[in-house]
Amino acid sequence: MTLRLGDTVPNFTQASSEGEIDFYTWAGDSWVILFSHPADYTPVCTTELGEVARLKSQFDKRNVKPIALSVDSVESHKGWIGDINETQKTTVNYPILADPDKKVSDLYDMIHPNASNTLTVRSVFIIDSDKKLRLTLTYPASTGRNFDELLRVIDSLQLTDNHSVATPVNWKDGGDCVIVPSLKDPEVLKEKFPKGYTEVKPYLRMTPQPNK
Ligand code: BEZ
């Protein structure tokens, strides 16, 4: 199934390192970062899953629940979690879905046959609290992901959902934003952006981050 931005993501029930998970129930009112990795007991994946555990408080702050997935079994995940904790000096504090029957991998199109017929690629899905897909990302097996970048995107999505701004190149939380081009009424602009704005071009107007 091809999932596109704005789609409602499909529900599933699947085993995990923390017991059986009904995805919608488990997600509740939170956002979710669902990410697949090619296999347990592999070096790059070990560093990635350790980093997500270290960043858990950052995800919590944003009301985001992490959940990982590979086509390995629950037993394999449980053994590997011991290695992640030991080598990455952390404690894995989120579930890893066990998908040996490829139910979830197929549902979310995480197996790309021309990369590997059997293993999931490094997919990322950021899903909002309405179960809408907000970001997809696909990395090759050989390249570990940058989870700081994913936090940055979540910051941008949560900001731009609530204010009439978008975030420019290389924006980070606290940086100047652009005012959405559709907003033109000077009275509305004054009301929405009391800190003011700079008009570089009629379509390029910069304003301090509204919620700071
Ligand atoms: C890794 O996580 O280290 C990895 C997994 C599959 C292929 C290459 C590297």
Image (cartoon, rainbow, N blue to C red):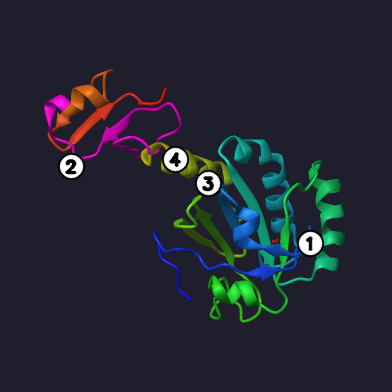
Q: Would you say residue 36 is visible in this rendering?
A: no
Q: Which residues are magenta?
A: 162-187
Q: Is mark 2 within 8 Å of ligand 1?
A: no
The local secondary structure at tag 3 comes to: helix
For residue 178, side relative to residue 111 (left or right): left
| Residue marked by disc 4 | 158
- Sooner in the amino-acid sequence: mark 1 or mark 4: 1
Expressed as whole percent of the image width and height from the top left, the position of residue 201 reads: 14, 33
The circle on residue 182 is: 2
Tell me the kind of residue under disc 3: Leu
- Sooner in the amino-acid sequence: mark 2 or mark 1: 1
Of all residues shown, which one is farthest toward the top? 195
Q: CA distance from mark 2 to mark 1?
A: 47 Å
Q: CA distance from mark 3 to mark 2?
A: 27 Å
3 vs 1, front mark: 1
4 vs 3, front mark: 4
Tell me the kind of residue under disc 1: Gly
Tell me the kind of residue under disc 2: Ser
Q: Quadrant of residue 193?
A: top left
3 vs 2, front mark: 2
- Sooner in the amino-acid sequence: mark 3 or mark 1: 1
Is residue 174 magenta-colored? yes
Tell me the kind of residue under disc 4: Gln
Characterize the local packing of mark 1: few (<14), some (14-19) or many (20 or more) Cα atoms within 10 angstroms: few
| Residue marked by disc 3 | 150
Is residue 25 magenta-colored? no
2 vs 1, front mark: 1
| Residue marked by disc 1 | 19
The local secondary structure at tag 4 comes to: helix
